[in-house]
Image (cartoon, rainbow, N blue to C red):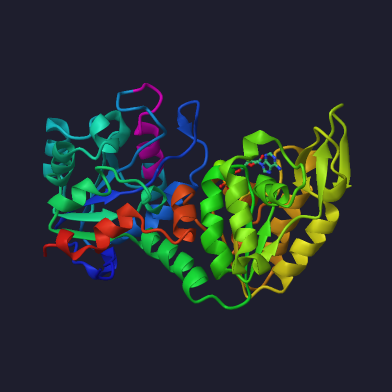
Amino acid sequence: MSPMRYVDQLDVEGRRVLLRVDLNVPLRDGSVEDDTRILAVLPTINYILDNGGMAIVMSHLDRPGGKRVAGLSLRPVAERLSEILATEVTFVDEIVGPAATSAAERMRPGSIVMLENLRFDKGEESNDEAFSKSLASLADIYVDDAFANAHRSHASNVGVTRHMEECCGGLLMKRELKALEGALESPKRPLVVAIGGAKVSSKIDVLENLARVADRLLLGGAMAFPFLRAQGLEVGDERFDGAAEEKARRILESDAAKALVIPEDFVISTMDGGVETVAVSRMPDGAQPLDIGPRTIEQFVNEIKGAGTIVWNGPMGMFEKEEFSAGTRSIAKAIADASAFSLAGGGDTGSAVDRYELRQRISYVSTGGGAFLEKLAGRQLPGIEALEDPEFIRS
Ligand code: ADP
Ligand code: MG
């Protein structure tokens, strides 16, 4: 593997740049509700335009399933981007085809074109060869700035690289990889990792790697359930059970177990709809543990205070409901207050960070959800490999 190159190492002057970004933003009533993801890719877009390049921007939006879906057009995103840049953004209402080709041909240095939602074409998600080739034919250089999509093997981030002479990462990609690699490969110790949320079956595999690299691994949300069950406690229901309990047992029996910090109390919703705080050993039958309890919060906060590096993914409880939000809010605040380098990622984790208005006080909030987790798990991401593999870079 050769190290990845980034757009600031290439000469973009007078060249067409096919730029993959993740502008999968929430829309409401036909306009952009949250422009965080647009702002995140501005450095790359500005770099290209300011250096006399031409940017052909492409993204997916939501899950149209390979066909045109009204309401999932990228047109409102192009309009918002145009407002932010204070520059005309030419929107093409197709992805590949004669209109896209002629829009690309008419470009001048400093101009910008946005293509329609990539997932309107089924060739995107199937990583179709012909579709990849058509995308590649629009430009001279390929830049991937869609870190949040890097765990996918799609035409616009993997297939296309096989048909372009020069491929590299964008400036957001660079920041994301630096933040993640910095936190995991050479962290200031102790490295404290907090994992919560509800996607137990997909996150349990991440824990196996994290338990090895972290000095302390704080387990909140439903992620704690399989560990408590493996210790013989009836916590959570079968939805959170199955193979996860077996994997939790394996981690508990390994050397990595010494890093684990498992909740000792929870805020529960009782059978009759009440809310109570109970120790894990006194969990009543049928109770739903929906937040970590005050003793656990105190313990987690202490670990965060003593950290050299902090990584956080997954809410500590069902924070969308006020009565189950104390765990997530307290942990988020403790991370923001800490002077240690802090890294947070995950869709709902990002929402929690914004709900408590802490984005500016966390060292780095990743735009990735799935990609962030897979990287934490120590896996190679196909979108990154495609950029690193020298066979794909034929300059
Ligand atoms: P992220 O998107 O940050 O990776 P997840 O998608 O795994 O996080 O989980 C987020 C969801 O987990 C939130 O909607 C939250 O309500 C839920 N959650 C957290 N703790 C619990 C719990 N103890 N029981 C049920 N749901 C929980
Ligand atoms: Mg989520």
Q: Which residues are magenta?
A: 69-81
> Residue 48 is drawn in which quadrant?
bottom left
Write down which quadrant ligand 1 falls in.
top right
In percent of width and height, residue 264 lies at 81, 55
Residue drawn 61% across the image and 62% down it: 362
User: Does residue 86 appear left or right of residue 168 in this picture?
Assistant: right
- In-front residue for pair 363/187: 187
Residue 75 among magenta residues: yes
Q: How many marks?
A: 0
User: Does residue 150 appear left or right of residue 359 in this picture?
Assistant: left
User: Does residue 244 appear left or right of residue 150 in this picture?
Assistant: right
Quarter the N terminus occupies: bottom left
Residue drawn 82% across the image and 44% down it: 267
Quarter the C terminus occupies: bottom left
In percent of width and height, residue 249 lies at 63, 54
In percent of width and height, residue 327 lies at 76, 51
- In-front residue for pair 73/313: 313
In percent of width and height, residue 178 lies at 43, 68
Q: Say if 221 sits above or below 210 in the image.
A: above
